[in-house]
Amino acid sequence: MLMLSLRISPVTALTFAIALQTSLFAAESESYQKAHHETIKTGRPMIVLVGADWCPACVTMKDEVVPRLKQRGVLRKVAFAAVDLDRQRQLGRKLTEGGPIPQLIMFRKTSEGWRRRTLIGGQSEKAVSTFIAEGIRLDQEAKQKEESKDKTG
């Protein structure tokens, strides 16, 4: 059996830890960036789940509710991102406006600017599904109004 001994200096270990942490942050930030870009490009509403690993309701939403919604196809009509408040503190605080977590936030772009809807606290799969369906309905109604206004206006 061959044993390999590797000695890493404290500075090298710290550098590696920082690089790893930075890449993890970038991946999460990329998720938000990707969803935002998708919303701009397609016009679909964007759903952002803001939570933290120490928050039981947040973990339930992220690990149980959201995967079931994805499996059922509920998230197909939206751009989705998850933001960890501890890892992306500035973005998380901006999104939650300093409020409690978990927060599920829907952004939809209209001719009058961005509209925001928020669902706060741990929620059931049904409550989140209803929240998303209502947001999509409002988005479609707003787009139909804009189209009819353009045709008559």
Image (cartoon, helix red, strand yellow):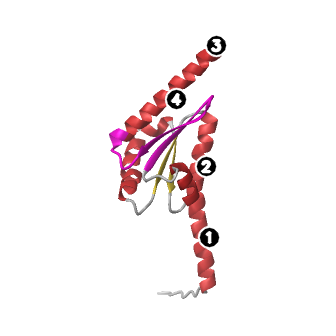
Amino acid at dot 2 = Gln
Disc marking residue 19: 1
Q: Mark 1 or 3, which is nearer the eye?
A: 3
Amino acid at dot 1 = Ala
Amino acid at dot 3 = Lys
Badge 4 or badge 2: first in the primary sequence: 2
Q: Are marks 1 and 2 in contact (CB under 8 Å)?
A: no
Q: Does the magenta stretch include residue 33?
A: no
- Secondary-structure class at tag 4: helix
Q: Is residue 114 magenta?
A: yes
- Residue at mark 1 to residue at mark 3: CA–CA distance: 54 Å
The boundaries of the magenta stretch are 103-127
Relative depth, front residue between 71 and 96:
96
Q: Do the residues labelled 3 and 4 touch (CB within 8 Å)?
A: no
Q: Are marks 1 and 3 in contact (CB under 8 Å)?
A: no
Badge 1 or badge 3: first in the primary sequence: 1
Q: Mark 1 or 4, which is nearer the eye?
A: 4
Badge 1 or badge 4: first in the primary sequence: 1
- Secondary-structure class at tag 3: helix
**Residue position for label 2:** 33
**Residue position for label 3:** 151
Instruction: Residue at 60%, 75% (x, y): give it.
Output: 16
Badge 1 or badge 2: first in the primary sequence: 1
